Image (cartoon, helix red, strand yellow):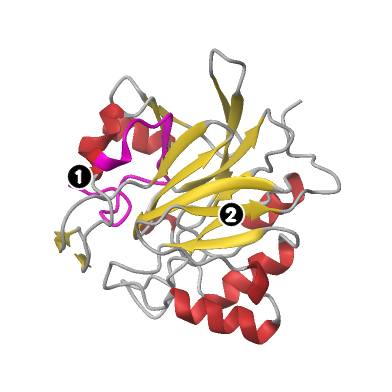
Amino acid sequence: MTSITITLVGGPTALIEAGGFRFVTDPTFDPPGDYALPHVTLRKTTGPSLSADRIGPVDAVLLSHDQHADNLDHGGKAFLPQAGRVLTTVAGAKRLGGGNVEGLEPWATRRLAKADGRAVEVTATPARHGPAGIEPLSGDVIGFVLRFADPATRPVYVTGDTVWYDGVAEVARRFRPGVLVLFAGAAQTRGPFHLTMDTNDAVEAAATFADALIVPVHTEGWAHFTQSADDLAKAFGALGFGERLRLLEPGAPTVIEAPPAAQAPGRLP
């Protein structure tokens, strides 16, 4: 069994510890408040379960996109310089600047290594932040697959803000992750459609990534999340996937035991 520790900070923000590396997803550390975007106002309803100071040093921030406050707020931006690296979209890297920020196109890979030989490859994955045609409004988004040199550590897939579509299915065709950190919540801001995965999308992901554990984030803390972790639990239970769902308690490090794969095409050589 592969042990991966995940701590939910709040919303899309989680600390992932695996293979000797520490990653933070989409950092949001502000207290509750409103954020006026060009076409909508986002409302944060709860603060983080851990402060940025309590997170400590991280090897990389995995930033699915920078243009929405529920994925990168003021405190999150202030956190970026203390990370070893910040991996995000090409457009986001241009907006953010900074010597540690690097933009990745989908399927581009970067290798992180330590002096003791531990290594991880981070591959950017496609994401679509809503229905087909939403891209000019929502902007670019990516997810990430983490592949470790340690053969005992299964890959981890961080979906980023996306709905279920063929780009996500392609990740399943290329990799065999043991853990999916799935951005859910059925976010709804502009109209009667979802900008992130709803329960149907999450079930589709569980069926397609058939031997992976599903760890939902992005289900609480913001007013535009329309489905909760409890909704996911009910849907998974009704369809017989309940034993593969791992719900996180904010602020509590949770060990996720990913089962070994019969084959591991996603592992580093």
- From the viewer's perspective, is residue 53 above or below residue 269? below
Extreme residue in the right direction: 262
Extreme residue in the bottom direction: 238
**Residue at 37% from the left image edge and 47% from the top image edge:** 26
Which numbered marker is on residue 75? 1
Is residue 71 rendered magenta in the image? yes
Read off the magenta span: 54-74
Three-letter amino acid code at disc 2?
A: Ile
Report the front residue among 49 and 202: 49
**Residue at 63% from the left image edge and 82% from the top image edge:** 237
How many residues crowd around disc 1 within 10 Å: few (fewer than 14), some, or many (20 or more)?
some
Answer with left or right where residue 122 lies relative to residue 9: right
Answer with left or right where residue 209 lies relative to residue 61: right
Is residue 101 rendered magenta in the image? no
Three-letter amino acid code at disc 1?
A: Gly
Which picture quadrant has residue 52?
A: top left
Q: Position of residue 268 (x, y in %)?
A: 72, 29
Element type where label 1 sits in the image = helix
Q: Position of residue 170 (x, y in %)?
A: 70, 52
Element type where label 2 sits in the image = strand
For label 2, the residue is: 256
Report the front residue among 45 and 54: 54
In the picture, which quadrant includes the C terminus? top right
Mark in front: 1 vs 2: 2
The disc, 1 or 2, on the residue closer to the chain's N-terminal end is: 1
Report the front residue among 132 and 72: 72
Q: Position of residue 129 (x, y in %)?
A: 45, 59
Which numbered marker is on residue 6? none
**Residue at 62% from the left image edge and 56% from the top image edge:** 168
- From the viewer's perspective, is residue 70 above or below residue 27? below
Q: Are marks 1 and 2 in contact (CB under 8 Å)?
A: no
- From the viewer's perspective, is residue 21 above or below residue 230? above
